Image (cartoon, grey):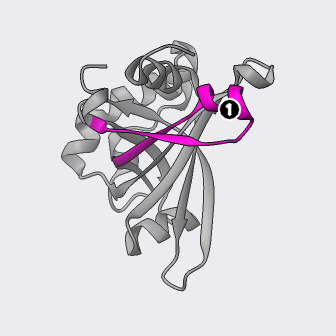
Amino acid sequence: MTDSPAARTRRLLDEARYLSLATVSTDEHPWSAVLQYAWLADPLRFLFGSATQSRHSMDIAARPLVSGSLFTSGGALMAVDGAQFAGVCRELSTEEVELYHATFYDAVLPDAADRAEWTLPVSALVAPAPHRLYLVEVEQWWLVDTRTWAEDRIDRRAEVPLSALSGM
């Protein structure tokens, strides 16, 4: 692939429907959850919704450092592309839920009829409700190094400076 890191990242963010988010509990137990997401640019961030009593939500409340991945596949081995990230995750404030509510639901429910049926109101996403919206602030970003894999079949990641993703 000869696309720039920003172009590849944009395509991945637009085409992948789910991300895998990894957390660690206070007693050192790792966990991974597959989540629907919306993404925000400049700086790169992810929004996702979850129940406050889910394992990853409880982990985030205690230890906000997270990592994750997302990928797309055209069916063929060489059509796979992906990214990994590390960052900090937190629950959104009421004001932020109001700000990002439509952005999140437009991304995870692109069909208007589905969105009308399944969108939770802001009041169902703030305390004391059992669901929340969360924000991952991406601090590091890696892309699958498709160039070197084609040459030597060694699976590598290439770190992309976040500054290279501005203006996506």
**Residue 150 at x, y = what percent?**
70, 26
Q: Quadrant of the N terminus?
A: top right
Residue at (55% x, 59% y) in the render: 22
Residue 167 sits inside the magenta stretch:
no
Residue at the bottom extreme of this rendering: 27
Residue 42 in view of the camera: yes
Assess disc 1: are there few (<14), some (14-19) or many (≥20) residues with their C-alpha within 10 Å of its C-alpha.
some
Above-or-below relation of 44 to 126: above
Q: Is residue 72 left or right of residue 121?
A: right
**Residue 119 at x, y = what percent?**
48, 32
Residue at (53% x, 50% y) in the render: 68
Q: Is residue 154 left or right of residue 97?
A: right
Residue at the right extreme of this rendering: 76
Residue 145, by quadrant, is: top right
Above-or-below relation of 148 to 132: above
Q: Quadrant of the C terminus?
A: top left
The residue indicated by pointer 1 is 149
Residue 157 sits inside the magenta stretch:
yes
Q: Amino acid at mark 1?
A: Trp
Residue at (23% x, 34% y) in the render: 99
**Residue 98 at x, y = what percent?**
25, 38
Residue at (40% x, 64% y) in the render: 65
Q: Is residue 94 left or right of residue 118?
A: left
Residue at the left extreme of this rendering: 95
**Residue 93 at x, y = what percent?**
24, 52
Above-or-below relation of 151 to 89: above
Label 1: element kind = helix
Residue closest to the eye, 83 or 122:
83
Magenta part of the chain: 139-162
